[in-house]
Amino acid sequence: MESTQARAARFFTQEPPRDGHAFMHVEWAAIEPFFNDLLAVELAAENVSGWLSAWSWLSNVIDESYARLHVATTVNTEDKEAEAHHRRFLEAIYPPALAMEQKLKEKLLASGLEPDGFALPLHHMRAEAELFREANLPLFTQEQNLITELNKIYGAQTVEWEGKEVTLIQLTPVYQETERARREKAWRLSMDRWLADRGKINEVWTRFLTLRRQMAANADKGDYRTYRWPLLHRFDYTPADCRSFQDAIEQVVVPAAERIYTRRKELLGVERLRPWDLDVDPLGREPLRPFVEVDDMEEKVGRIFDKMDPQLGGYFGIMRREGLLDLDNRKGKAPGGYCTNFDYVQQPFIFMNAVGLQRDVETLLHESGHSFHVFEMRGLPYQQQKSIALEFAEVASMSMELLSLPYLIGEDSFYTNAQAARARAEQLESIVLFWPYMAVVDAFQHWVYENDEAAGDPAQCDAQWSKLWRRFMRGVDWDDFADAMATGWHRKHHIFKYPFYYVEYGLAQLGAVQVWRNALENHAGALAAYRRALALGATASLPELFAAAGANFAFDAATLQTAVDLLMQKIDEAWAQ
């Protein structure tokens, strides 16, 4: 097969660009001949490895093109040129590329060949090939365009606070202030702004559902969940397992979460714990402000990784030097945080919205775990071996948050011993409090696609979300805020953009707590197992990946109880310091 350098020369008519920006302007006419060349090859045992390498190279080019265009639309939702490039890619390149990818999958599957380390990718290909329908290609494009439209709604959400226009994210530090009236005022202002967009968000939602209903029908599936499940490569668990996990959370975690809320209410000395009471320090201490400038956060996180493992520190240093971090919040920036891959240059990119909170430090540590996954997989030869199961991808990120806890202390880091104990208590509490919220999001998504006609009515979605909220989120008083509570699903963008992507966080968190438990006994050993598991990429099943990292892939109440007991013990110890 043709060498990488020769392919690059034909594709770019020059040396391949290091930063990948040239991908943004590549036309389909330049891409199609590469697919045709691959389709013309007569596959045999002696050439399949080179053929897969060439296919991987082409997929990396296309995937990085899309990733860079997506990044451009999120770092500035008001950038019309970026939006136009993104739309052109989705309409002119993405659909024919998917159609050609389908032909390549069919060719490999028909050959009966199985290269080393390719058993699981072949299993995934069979599922994808079985579900592929050309009629869905324009629907995928429409779905991505809807995501851009939703991001523009989110990116425009600002309010006036003390004479300044601020984003809703920039308002969040107020929730940590000790003056309760100010917290309430800021919270009400934020909720009012969300409710002002209620109609717009509902309208986008109904269009998402219409598209997804048609996708499932085109693939001869009775409902969208049946269609989506194998596309997410969920072969190691079922929707019934998700229900079991939700039940286990209700049995084990909800009572523990109520204990945390009760302690907070008592320490605050309030009769009712309200939504604006959840982020303030219950002992009345000033908020933790680990950094002011984003550069300072970057520098200190870099030191954490240097101390933890020089190789991890080296990875993070590459990201800093090569402009692979966009961390500060600003007007016009999409909400949330993510780590994406630039597959051609084999580098990750981290996006987030930092405003000076401990949560920002946790987010950067979390997304750095994802980035380390990208770096550790560079030894795998084929792109298809790097399609990581999201359930384990989140183990990479959530484990890194916990593995970093010992390094938050010191003059060259973020906190004193006392401050670090406080940050640790807050973070460990957030894990316990997260599982019930995750159960709400996951159960809501199952309800949506089991009842998609009812879910097409946003009022029924509001009612179902409220029902699930009352089931799992006990301990906080939402009286007088029925609309704000009912529209909580509007504030979880995964529900709109990435259907069924949320249970991964809950399963991965359970895995991460087990990795952390191992680290409490042998930090170096746990970190080594973590890195070995990351390097496996998509060449092992979920149970095998969890086991390699030193954890069990589980949904049961007993495993969850062990994790919660450890968390509650360490929370009590941190509060005692």
Image (cartoon, grey):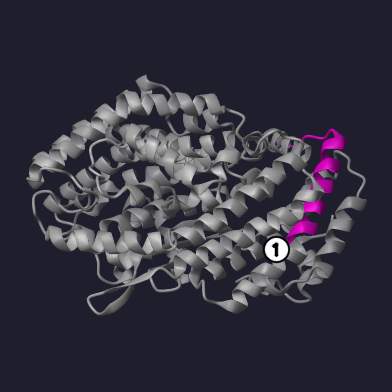
Of the pair 399 and 75, the residue shown nearer to us: 75
Could you tell me what secondary structure mostly forms the magenta stretch? helix
Of the pair 157 and 234, the residue shown nearer to us: 157
Q: Which residue corresponds to the image point at 80% horizontal and 43% vertical from the top-left?
A: 105
Give the image location of residue 358, x and y in percent: 26, 57
Q: Amino acid at mark 1?
A: Leu
Q: Is residue 53 visible?
A: no
Give the image location of residue 322, x and y in percent: 49, 70
Of the pair 172 and 533, the residue shown nearer to us: 172
Looking at the rendered image, the quarter that the C terminus falls into is top left
Residue 385 within the magenta-colored segment of the rendering: no
- Residue at which label 1 appears: 90
Q: Residue furthest left?
A: 269
Q: Would residue 116 be found to the left or right of residue 535 on screen?
A: right
The stretch of residues the image draws in magenta is: 94-116
Of the pair 492 and 2, the residue shown nearer to us: 492
Q: How many circles with numbers are drawn on the protein?
A: 1
Q: Is residue 537 above or below residue 559?
A: below
Q: Is residue 315 visible?
A: yes
Quarter of the image for residue 439 reads: top left
Quarter of the image for residue 527 reads: top left
Looking at the rendered image, the quarter that the N terminus falls into is bottom right
Q: Would residue 271 be found to the left or right of residue 79 on screen?
A: left
